[in-house]
Image (spheres, helix red, strand yellow):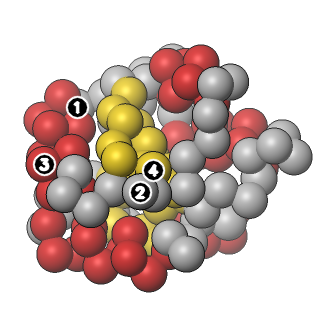
Amino acid sequence: MKTIFVVDDSISNLVTARQALSGQYEVYTFSSADLMFEHLGHFVPDLILLDLLMPEINGFSAFRHLINDKRYRNIPVVIFTSKGDAATETLSYQVGAVDFIRKPFTEAVLLESMRRHIS
């Protein structure tokens, strides 16, 4: 079974994403990028679903850390955020995101994005 890390400081988004994805993927949820990085030391997921607006380490900073580390740079990252303006979406793709999902998200959109980007 493919593994997805979901990183968001909103517990309700973590619960919703877990419920949507659990039937088809092994899902690990983290309320901060720090917690995600702690677990990356133990195993590498097939995809990371990453919120941008988080305290301490925001999504773009976390993404830069991932792509600057050869162990993690090939993990597909899907950005999901409530900051859905065109500039943020463009920047997300420029830094290497494979997809951009606006919150609130639907289960169908989330599942389709995961299906497309997990080989």
**Residue tagged 4:** 3
Q: Is residue 58 left or right of residue 109?
A: right
Tag 3–tag 4 contact (CB < 8 Å): no
Residue drawn 43% across and 50% down?
A: 4
**Helix or strand or loop: what does disc 1 sit on?**
loop
18 shown above or below 12 = below
Q: How far apart are marks 3 and 1 (CA)?
A: 14 Å
Tag 3–tag 1 contact (CB < 8 Å): no
> Residue 72 in the image: x percent, y percent?
74, 46
The amino acid at mark 2 is Met
**Which sits earlier in the primary sequence, circle 1 or circle 2?**
2
**Residue tagged 2:** 1
**Helix or strand or loop: what does disc 3 sit on?**
helix
Q: Nearer the viewer, mark 3 or mark 1?
A: 3
**Which sits earlier in the primary sequence, circle 4 or circle 1?**
4
Q: Distance between the residues labelled 2 and 4?
A: 7 Å
Category of crowding for the residue at label 3, using alpha-carbon neighbours closer than 10 angstroms: few (below 14), some (14–19), many (at least 20): few
**Residue tagged 1:** 10
